[in-house]
Image (cartoon, coloured by chain):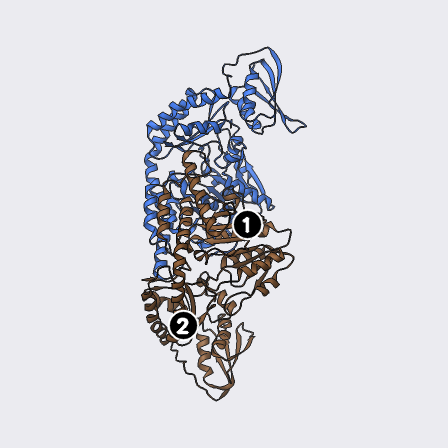
Chain colours: A blue, B brown
Amino acid sequence: MAYFDVASSAPLHPVARQALQASLDDGWADPSRLYREGRKARLLLDAAREAAAEALECRADELVFTSSGTRAVHEGIAGALAGRRRVGRHLVVSAVEHSAVLHSAAAHERGGGAVTEVGVGREGAVSVSSYADALRPDTALACLQSANHEVGTVQPVAGVAEACRAAGVPLFVDAAQSLAWGPVAEGWSLLAGSAHKWGGPAGVGVLAVRKGVRFAPQGPADERESGRAAGFENIPGVVAAAASLRAVRAEAAGEAARLRELTDRMRARVPELVPDVEVVGDPVRRLPHLLTFSCLYVDGETVLHELDRAGFSVSSGSSCTSSTLTPSHVLRAMGVVSEGNVRVSLPLGVAEAEVERFLAVLPGVVHGVREKLGVSVAGGGDGDAEAVTVDALGLTCPQPVIELARAIGRVRPGGTVTVLADDEVAAVDIPAWCFTQGHEYVGASPRPDGASAYEVRKAP
Amino acid sequence: MAYFDVASSAPLHPVARQALQASLDDGWADPSRLYREGRKARLLLDAAREAAAEALECRADELVFTSSGTRAVHEGIAGALAGRRRVGRHLVVSAVEHSAVLHSAAAHERGGGAVTEVGVGREGAVSVSSYADALRPDTALACLQSANHEVGTVQPVAGVAEACRAAGVPLFVDAAQSLAWGPVAEGWSLLAGSAHKWGGPAGVGVLAVRKGVRFAPQGPADERESGRAAGFENIPGVVAAAASLRAVRAEAAGEAARLRELTDRMRARVPELVPDVEVVGDPVRRLPHLLTFSCLYVDGETVLHELDRAGFSVSSGSSCTSSTLTPSHVLRAMGVVSEGNVRVSLPLGVAEAEVERFLAVLPGVVHGVREKLGVSVAGGGDGDAEAVTVDALGLTCPQPVIELARAIGRVRPGGTVTVLADDEVAAVDIPAWCFTQGHEYVGASPRPDGASAYEVRKAP
């Protein structure tokens, strides 16, 4: 069995388990009580806060523990926006933020606020200049992840922080995917993280708010955690979270180069082993343990199921929208193929042999799925038709792209294929497919029945 | 060492510890993932939900796990209010709810809603008829605790539920203090609880919303826990919480009669052993393990400190406002003395000998504190003054009451004492003291300097 999905959740680190068990005896009482059990709980809480703050490179009194990374994001963004309401109600986010950030932005819009989404390049990163251009005099807050959760691309946080500083706008950094690997570079105003992503327990997030950043906690008042995280403190959880962050950092320092070599190897070999694959994300400025690729002409769900049967746990598309059947907003924003998407995130200490076994298994899995779907599009060749229209109405991903790939072989170079499709994934995957295959994506026109007609011109 | 403060937080139950440890191996993955680790996590989560729902006597699909009891209260009240916004924006609460409820009510008021606080009698319970009178056509939600957290008085939930049903208003029950002892009687619409109060781990609350109750989750969207509790699921925590609730219920059934006998004994003997003590709360309709009393002429903080030195962990006044130096809102609403307040809440399995030792230690502790304060008021007697004015400006609790008690001995029966005081606790404790001593509290008049003049007529 190989668990290759630590970007979703990492198994509990042995140090976290030890710290959790050790603090169950002394960490259950109310730390605001003055009797002995309360004082013991307070000592544990204070020590955990010191350790976590050191790992985040902030002051202990700048850091609170929340009940999850999601909560750290929700409370952090809401508090920062409210703290700067007088400045304005404009929020800037990147288009590839985690859903916790984008849902916060949507809530802000519902409440009458304005939101600008900064787009990303094909490798998943924002550019500093386009981010800077989005900042306005009424911008209350800017949000940027440290690294993307789906494709591993590292964002230019330092540059964006500098642009925000120049504009007088606080920067909120969602560091959930990167904290195991190191602190975020200086310049952030607020920072959020999630313990179960670094091998700590579920139920613990961290929110740091730099001194001097205006912050007004929202929701009903609660005096715990400086009023920034309501609810009785989960002290065994935070002790385990802080202890494991320190331990994981020490291991990560030793593992980063090895994992990067393994993921580089996968990035190179997957396209050699499997036809019609696009490896996505920045090849260099990326997290060491994560890679993502999309296999044309298959659906991700079936690939995942077959990989699970073969003993590999990986995920597909957006980690948080997979159940909604909509394509990943990250892949969409990058303009890359979303069908047949596979994200691999390797755990610390993974055996090289497991990675090799994955590379040995993957081609057969993808081939099997394509065979079931009756796909035989490789090769292609040219036909003599000038223009072909394909009716893919009612067909879902990956069928519209498969139909397009078949039809492209029937037209002459420079000829056109029009695909009629109502599956919304087609709007992402048809242009992305054209890009990977070298054909020209002309555009889409809406039809009266709600579907779209996608026009593709074959490479001359 | 005797920990007598389970109403704040109970030590982790052995069953909770076992369940927590057992589920660390299988409960760390994302339960929404379809691979094997995710499926294992999902099985644990589903089983915990079934077990918790059975203990609450609701359906599993009515129950979500939150990150704390506080969060269950905050999200439950906000969601229910939003769900019935079309009906109106009026909220009814009792005056003795936990601060999580009252802070939710305050947030609702800040947002433009209306709140009615239903008062309580001297024993801490609302009356069904006065609660029913507070319900209006525009009432969106009514809130009532199952039992009070400071004095243990059990509220007439069934009667209030019936009145709410008749008025078509959903009833939210904060059952944090009573779930260890049994389910809440039928009739509630929403129910909240907190695992660490019943010996489960911190970081877990429960929120049940009956089918058919309109509910609109507030804040940023999140698909976990039916959209009602944002954040990655803390599965080891919820497994431990559910397992321990079942175990604690079984023990509580056997312990209830014994603990009630012990607390009855304390209720009877504390006033015999310590002069000038008022035992508060309902003597019969109360939680079996909890009693509260106030010792005149001492400050609770010092009493707690001395009891801690003697090996007893108890709390004083409101569990959540002790750090704010304001008198407990519960004791104030009941009109009882707040000074020298001690709450004792016995753990399951407490040794009778520990209770006896507490009774042996308490008189010396209170006597010692009174001696340090120079209190020698017992006895009293009569003087011949017609009216005495006492300047207690700048003095804090319990000094104004001590000055009053001294002065009352200098006036003739039927004469008056006027106390000038600026400590806000005096507004609670002077009337309450009069009640316990049989003197007439005439009233208070504000002074230009912001202080008040409290007038007391000595019993004839």
Image vertical order of residue B415 relative to residue B421, above or below: below
Callout 2: chain: B
Helix, strand or loop at label 2? It is: helix
Q: Name the residue rendered at 57%, 45% in the picture.
A: A108
The amino acid on which the numbered mark 1 sits, given as a three-letter code, is Arg
**Residue A31 appears in the figure:** no
- Badge 1: few (under 14), some or many (20 or more) residues near its Cα, within 10 Å? some
Between residue A159 and residue A205, name the one nearer to us.
Answer: A205
Q: Is residue A459 left or right of residue B272?
A: right
Q: Quadrant of the N terminus of chain B?
A: bottom left
Q: Position of residue B355 (x, y in %)?
A: 34, 66
Tag 1 and tag 2, C-beta contact below 8 Å: no
Residue A46, image x, y percentages: 37, 53
Q: Counting other residues with Cα less than 10 Å from the Cα at mark 2, is it few (<14), some (14-19), or many (20 or more)?
A: few
- Let me know if residue B23 appears in the view: yes
Instruction: Name the residue: 49% across, 65% down.
Output: B330
| Residue pointed to by mark 2 | B268
Q: The residue under label 2 is which amino acid type?
A: Ala
**Residue that extends furthest to the right in the rendered view of this protein:** A448
Q: Locate residue A247, reporting x and y percent.
A: 33, 42
Distance between mark 1 and mark 2 Cα atoms:
41 Å
Q: Where's residue A172, x and y in %?
A: 48, 43
Displayed quadrant of residue A401: top right
**If you read the primary sequence from the N terminus, does the residue marked by circle 1 or circle 2 appear first?**
1
User: Circle 1 is placed at which residue position?
Assistant: B210
